[in-house]
Amino acid sequence: MDSRDLSIWANAEVRVGVPGRLAGIMEGSLRPEAERPTSERSSVEVETGDGGLVIRIEASDVAALRAAFNSYIRWVLSILDVVDSVEE
């Protein structure tokens, strides 16, 4: 995580079980969002880990955590939909 002082109150870790190659593609797609957050109320770290993609969210309050969580989950689902449609 970056060095911003968030007075962290809430955090979450999401693990998405996908093959390594797809995890790398997803990480590359989500990294720009994590590096340039739209709000200073949360920060996100995206990396590949054991068995897939790991998304760590730290936020100053529950509402900010929920907003960041929902955004990343929607982006993950969008990536999976695109991959699914390309593979058909």
Image (spheres, rainbow, N blue to C red):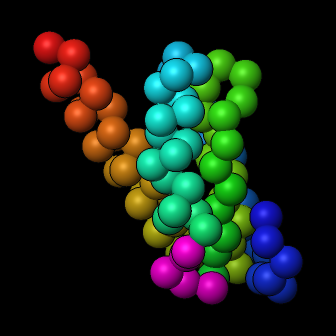
In the shown orientation, is residue 39 left or right of residue 8? left
The boundaries of the magenta stretch are 36-40
As drawn, 44 above or below 8:
above
Name the main secondary structure of what is drawn in magenta.
loop
- Residue 76 lies left or right of residue 46; in this view the side is left
Q: Position of residue 6 (x, y in %)?
A: 78, 82
User: Which residue is drawn at the image coordinates 56% and 55% (left, top)?
Assistant: 31
Q: Nearer the viewer, residue 66 or 29?
A: 29
Count numbered badges in the picture: 0
Q: Position of residue 49 (x, y in %)?
A: 71, 30
Quarter of the image with the N terminus in it: bottom right
Where residue 14 sits, quadrant-wise, is top right
Q: Residue 68: horizontal and vertical position, in percent?
A: 51, 65
Q: Is residue 63 above or below residue 17?
A: below
Residue 70 location (% of width, % of height): 43, 58
Up-down relation of residue 15 to residue 37 (above or below) = above
* Magenta highlight on residue 77: no
Q: Is residue 2 visible?
A: yes
Residue 17 seen in this snapshot: no
The image quadrant that residue 2 belongs to is bottom right
Residue at (16% x, 25% y) in the render? 85
- 81 left or right of 13 in image: left
Image quadrant for the C terminus? top left
Is residue 17 placed above or below 55 in the rendered structure? Answer: above
Q: Is 25 left or right of 5, judged from the image as shown?
A: left
Q: Residue at x 66, y 70 (%)?
A: 43
Residue 38 in magenta? yes
Residue at figure coordinates x 71%, y 65% from the top left: 58
